[in-house]
Image (cartoon, rainbow, N blue to C red):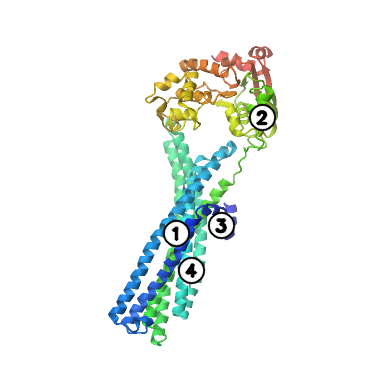
């Protein structure tokens, strides 16, 4: 927090604002029209007190505008009323159009920023999500983006509107009486200083409030996602107390923002009353000296009120800006997160490599080191080759690095050292889209999206309905799908909560089968299936792995006897390799694990 406090200054604020100006450029025509409408609005607003002042002068038979000198009182009043109504109509019409355009700009910018932010977040590497709470991301994509939209719409354009109004009023009052005008203008100096002070305090409190809101959202998301554990272990009261504690801190910071915001409004109200009193006192003196008419004094009293109205609005906008600048900083901080996994630009094709080398799914690890932290390696100097069509099993204790190998192969992470080749090509030189079509992965827990069964198999790709049915048939789940209420068009709830764990896993098999990958990865893929379902799917698995390079992670060693090779890992190192029988003869780690499982079975 101290670092944040030291870094906040106007230069930094506007630098953040300038970063997002390109979003305004997309709406430049609408913005130009909106700004143009501010001129007649300001002029009409500045003329109205003069018209009322002339009416007062006309009633008191004081000097008035020249074109009113030779008309009767009734005619003069009618002319002034007509002029006043004209300015009112102009302000109503232009204010409505201008307000609509401003809000339209805000919504366009909000939508564009949210889309770009979502696209950026979904392109970030898995390493980023390992350290970032989901609730924090949700806050930035929702409330922070909304605050940003307010800055661009009501905030930015509103401030310009207030400035134009103040300029129009100041020019007009100097034309009427420069002495009173100077007093009013001088009173703006302490007002500006107070606004800046209170808004700085508001900004700091607002930043802390948004941090607490992120924590609230993170805890809410965590408790909803883990509701079963919360209820099974009776953590409702404990978690509620934790939530209450964070909520109280959030409320405290919000109270501080309210205090500083209210302080600005109260200060402006007090200074506005002082300004009116000063105008009445000095203006009355000028009227008695006959250097000012009563009508001009009436106009000045109205100007005193109108001069501080834009200042009040400006203070409100400034408060909005402080919230917006906090949001901009948080959003740009997220947008500046580097996309670690990027295509190299060489765009080498696996299909072309296969034509030239006749390889279909060869995998090679060359001196691969990897750690989730720079000083803690979970994989150490891995060197191995998986031949095309070979079936490999990865075995080892928990934490040995089996899943890390899969993540590196799919390029969800980059190796710290060394390189990985598929069909003789470094995976860094293969477009990510092609690499992930080439490798089919079935995880222990499959994630389903809200939508129908068909879309959960195609995942947005353009597969025909016939191809979807064929993939389901290959994986022996066509009967299960057809038994659903609406078949392939059955709507699934978020995370597929209206399906069993085994049914969700079955859909994952069809999802991979339809893409016909050359490399198949099974990470405990049958662990959530019951005995009957597992027997049904085993035939489908045999079909899937028959002509493909296959990597199987399995804790039940009895399921991998038939693979071509078993690679045994311990603390990130490859310590044994061979067939089931060869490893039993070596009487090493694999043999020990196998005997333990057999005894436990």
Indicate which label's residue lies in the foreground, 3 or 4.
Answer: 3
**Residue behind mark 2:** 379
Estimate the spatial distance between the alpha carbons at disc 4 and disc 1, rounded to whole Å. 17 Å
Q: Are there few (<14), some (14-19), or many (20+) residues within 10 Å of tag 1? A: some
> Which residue is nearer to you in this view: 68 or 132?
68
Looking at the image, is mark 2 or mark 4 earlier in the sequence?
Answer: 4
Q: Secondary structure at mark 4?
A: helix
Q: Are marks 2 and 4 in contact (CB under 8 Å)?
A: no
Estimate the spatial distance between the alpha carbons at disc 3 and disc 4, rounded to whole Å. 21 Å
Estimate the spatial distance between the alpha carbons at disc 2 and disc 4, rounded to whole Å. 63 Å
Q: Secondary structure at mark 1?
A: helix
Residue 319 makes an appearance in the image: no
Residue 261 sits in quarter: bottom left
Q: Are marks 3 and 1 in contact (CB under 8 Å)?
A: no
Residue 13 sits in quarter: bottom right
**Residue behind mark 3:** 13
Indicate which label's residue lies in the foreground, 3 or 1.
Answer: 3
Looking at the image, is mark 3 or mark 4 earlier in the sequence?
Answer: 3
Q: Residue at x 59, y 44 (%)?
A: 337
Q: Residue at x 50, y 17 (%)?
A: 537
Looking at the image, is mark 4 or mark 1 earlier in the sequence?
Answer: 4
Indicate which label's residue lies in the foreground, 2 or 1.
Answer: 2
Q: Secondary structure at mark 2?
A: strand
**Residue behind mark 4:** 191
**Residue behind mark 1:** 259
Looking at the image, is mark 3 or mark 1 earlier in the sequence?
Answer: 3
């Amino acid at each position: 927090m101290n670092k944040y406090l030291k870094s906040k200054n106007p230069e930094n604020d506007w630098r953040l604002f300038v970063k997002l100006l390109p979003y305004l450029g997309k709406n430049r025509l609408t913005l130009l029209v909106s700004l143009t409408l501010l001129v007649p609005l300001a002029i009409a607003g500045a003329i109205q007190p003069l018209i009322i002042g002339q009416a007062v002068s006309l009633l008191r038979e004081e000097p008035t505008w020249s074109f009113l000198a030779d008309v009767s009182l009734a005619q003069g009043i009618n002319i002034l009323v007509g002029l006043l109504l004209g300015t009112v109509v102009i302000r109503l019409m232009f204010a409505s159009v201008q307000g609509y355009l401003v809000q339209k700009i805000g919504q366009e910018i909000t939508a564009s920023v949210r889309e770009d932010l979502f696209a950026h977040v979904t392109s970030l590497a898995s390493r980023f999500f390992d350290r970032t709470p989901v609730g924090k991301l949700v806050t930035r994509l929702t409330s922070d983006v909304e605050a940003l939209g307010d800055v661009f719409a009501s905030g930015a354009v509103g401030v310009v509107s207030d400035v134009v109004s103040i300029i129009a009023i100041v020019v007009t009052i100097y034309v009427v009486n420069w002495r009173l005008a100077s007093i009013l203008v001088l009173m703006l100096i302490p007002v500006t200083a107070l606004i800046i002070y209170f808004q700085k305090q508001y900004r700091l409190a607002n930043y802390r409030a948004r941090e607490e809101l992120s924590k609230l959202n993170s805890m809410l998301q965590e408790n909803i996602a883990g509701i079963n554990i919360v209820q099974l272990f009776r953590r409702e009261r404990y978690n509620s107390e934790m939530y209450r504690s964070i909520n109280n801190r959030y409320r405290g910071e919000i109270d501080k923002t309210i205090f500083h915001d209210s302080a600005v409004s109260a200060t402006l109200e007090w200074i506005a009353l002082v300004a009116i009193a000063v105008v009445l006192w000095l203006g009355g003196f000028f009227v008695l000296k006959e250097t000012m008419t009563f009508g001009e004094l009436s106009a000045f009293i109205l100007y005193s009120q109108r001069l501080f109205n834009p200042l009040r609005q400006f203070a409100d906008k400034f408060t909005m800006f402080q919230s917006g600048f906090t949001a901009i900083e948080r959003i740009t901080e997220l947008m500046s997160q580097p996309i670690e996994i990027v295509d190299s630009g060489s765009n080498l094709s696996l299909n072309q490599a296969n034509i030239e080398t006749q390889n279909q799914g060869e995998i090679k690890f060359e001196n691969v080191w990897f750690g989730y932290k720079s000083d803690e390696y979970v994989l150490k100097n891995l060197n191995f080759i998986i031949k095309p069509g070979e079936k490999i099993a990865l075995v080892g204790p928990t934490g040995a690095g089996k899943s890390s190998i899969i993540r590196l192969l799919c390029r969800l992470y980059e190796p710290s050292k060394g390189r990985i080749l598929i069909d003789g090509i470094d995976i860094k030189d293969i477009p990510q889209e092609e690499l992930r079509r080439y490798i089919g992965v079935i995880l222990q827990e499959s994630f389903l999206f809200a939508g129908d069964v068909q879309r959960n198999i195609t995942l947005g790709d353009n597969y025909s309905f016939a191809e979807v049915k064929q993939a389901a048939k290959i994986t022996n789940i066509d009967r299960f799908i057809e038994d659903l209420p609406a078949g392939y068009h059955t709507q699934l709830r978020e995370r597929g909560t209206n399906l069993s764990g085994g049914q969700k896993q079955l859909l994952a098999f069809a999802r991979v089968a339809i893409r016909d990958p050359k490399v198949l990865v099974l990470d405990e893929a049958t662990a959530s299936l019951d005995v009957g379902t597992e027997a049904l799917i085993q035939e489908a698995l045999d079909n899937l792995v028959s002509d493909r390079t296959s990597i199987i992670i399995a804790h039940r060693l009895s399921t991998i006897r038939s693979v071509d090779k078993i690679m045994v890992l311990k603390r990130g190192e490859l310590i044994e390799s061979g067939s089931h029988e060869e490893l039993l003869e070596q009487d090493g780690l694999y043999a020990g694990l196998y005997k333990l499982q057999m005894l436990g079975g």
